[in-house]
Image (spheres, rainbow, N blue to C red):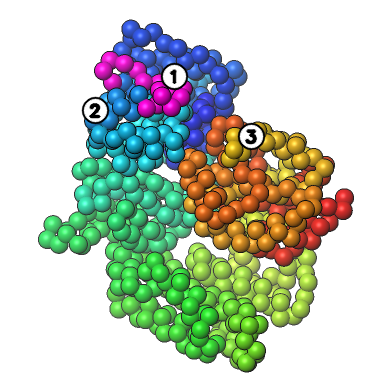
Amino acid sequence: MKIILASKSPRRQELIKGLELDYSIVTYEVDESFDSSLTPDEIASGLAIKKAEHYPGKLTKDELLLTADTIVWINHTVLNKPCNKEEALEMLQQICGETHSVYTGVCLKTENKTISFSEKSEVSCKQLNLKEMEHYIDNYKPYDKAGSYGIQDWFGYTAVERINGCFYNVMGLPVSRIYEVLKKEFGLTLLMLFMSYVGFAQTRTVIEGKLPAKKGQAMVQFFANPFDNEPTNRNFEIGEDGNFKEVMNISEGQMIAFVDAKDFMRFYIKPGDSLNLSIDPKDAQKLVISGKGNKDAIFGYKQFLHFKSTTESIEFQKIIGIKMNMLSPQTFKFWADSIVKEKQSFLQANGQSLSTEARLQIGAENFYEFENLKLTYPQYYENRRKSNSTLPALDASYFDFLKNVDLNQSKIMHSPQYRTFQKLNLIKAINDNGQKLTIVEIWKYCETFFKGDVLKIFRLHIWADIVYNSTVEDAGSLYKLAQAECQNLPGYTTVEAAYLDKLPFTVGSKAYPFKMKDAQGNLVSLEDFKGKVVYLDFWASWCRPCLGEIPAGEELKKYFAGKDVVFINISIDEGEQNWIAAKNRYSISGIHLLSNNGSSPEVQKKYKVTSIPSYFLIGKDGNFISAPAPRPSAPNIYNMIEEALKK
């Protein structure tokens, strides 16, 4: 079953994504007038039905159309979306200090069946003063929101005092109710759900419980499948009573992060686990973990607490950087080995109740995390030597620790740190031999190190890296090889689908045209820059890798200043405030556009931007030169732009 969500709302699009269904987005205009004599639930559901009736396409037997409309109801009056600042201010003055109702009407329609309903939530708001209301309107511009506010932004944080009902309903979609109706009325099963979402064997995994001290916004951070470069951040609400429930789909065991406004914690979880978190009645500082998989989770939590002030601290990445820039090679190895010894000793002393899978993976993660640091250290050391000529060259004996490491341990191939270690070893061997290998030659060279099933799994991950992070041409050069060797492996269909999805981005194909408003409100079109080379940067204010590329990006812009190169920064921030603040704070030059401001909502989708930062290089003829393109910090981007300018 494929869901078609008919909505321009970025909130609804984000919420439907959370159900992990196979879905697509359509937009079309519908007259949203209504009979004011109707009850609020009749108005909301009636508008949803009207949107479904005006769907311009024809549904096939495996498609389901989902339409929705949200209204705010107070004092027997509907508050729609404000048209200007005056209307927005008037609405906020009505709801502040009062309790109002939010109704979302939903219509689910297939080829031969239609179900509609409405969901109600009551929202109580504190009183804000005029200055605070104007601050909200000026900075968050809530003109696309019923009642002139978003519960998920600044207004929700500061003014919303209590919610009675579904939080997501207030955002615009009662996803829990929709999920139940899909199961009951349309026969949606978990099997259909998981098979439609990805081609990888992901399993429903649950975290729920009651944590009154952590009420409010929270987040779980996890890797949905082994090919993800960045973790999935799932935001949710812990209710006033402390109750919550989150469902994840994961494909391998891992330490996940559980973050709330005051603190964070980590614990181990496997696919199919169902954990319940609560507070020990005898000790409010102690977490009780029960349910399926609790023994593995408890050990992970204990390990986190034991190392919370050291390797599990938020500051540990900074400590690693300091050590790499201060310690001598042998001292750095000794420091890394001492941490591994402490972690493995803790595992030996406290891990008796762990499952075999968890013990193997946690042990591998503990060990290979620091083996990877030892492998990465030399490049930091060489950078230090460039600025300090008194430092001796790195002795070849530094790498003696690699002699006794087995690269073909099939039992720990589910460890991300071990897979990274395998890749770093391969890269080191190629560099040591001074070889410049093509991608196909690297595929063949893997046989030097890996055997049997380990070789197949490793090659699938190599191909996945290229599919997700390199050009479609590079990915295509390995397609038939990967198909012949890896097609029976779990996860192959996921990578293949991603590759096939990128085919429109071959070199020489037409770049998707767009028209968007810039930070000053001027309309900017890709067509405006025909005859110039265009470097697109998709980023967001909250993306650390994006921010990390800013210095290199500014150097790149300075280098090509005065030449026919245009740098366009497209933010995917939902609101304008964070976008503008980050642009100004980091002094990012170039043209600035916001993809979620309604002027061109299809841009991010058309460019298939699923992770950021993402870069695209477009030639003077408006065709792709590289999609995706190298980052600003990659030395070859300079040559690519120089070559593009010559054409």
Work out whether residue 439 or residue 538 is closer to the camera in this orientation and state it: 538
102 relative to 598 in the view: left or right: left
Q: Position of residue 563 (x, y in %)?
A: 79, 52
Residue 468 located left or right of residue 216: right
Query: Which percent across, then down, holds residue 184?
Result: 37, 27
Asked if residue 391 is among those painted magenta in the image, a careful observer would answer no
Mark sitting on residue 522? 3
The percent position of residue 242, horizontal first and vertical second, equals 23, 46
Q: Is residue 207 depicted above or below 333 in this figure?
A: above
- Kind of residue indicated by mark 3: Asn
- Residue in the image at 60% along x and 82% along y: 384
Q: Name the residue type under label 2.
A: Thr
Taking the spot 15% from the left edge, 62% from the top edge, the residue there is: 283
Q: CA distance from mark 3 to mark 2?
A: 39 Å
Marks 3 & 1, CB-CB < 8 Å contact: no
Which residue shows up at 76% across the image and 40% down it? Answer: 529
Check disc 2: other Cα within 10 Å, few if <14, some if 14-19, many if 20+.
Answer: some
- Please provide the residue range marked out in magenta: 74-89
Residue designated by label 1: 48
Looking at the rendered image, the disc whose residue lies closer to the viewer, 2 or 1, is 2
Tag of residue 99: 2
Q: Nearer the viewer, mark 3 or mark 2?
A: 3
Q: Is residue 123 above or below residue 213?
A: above
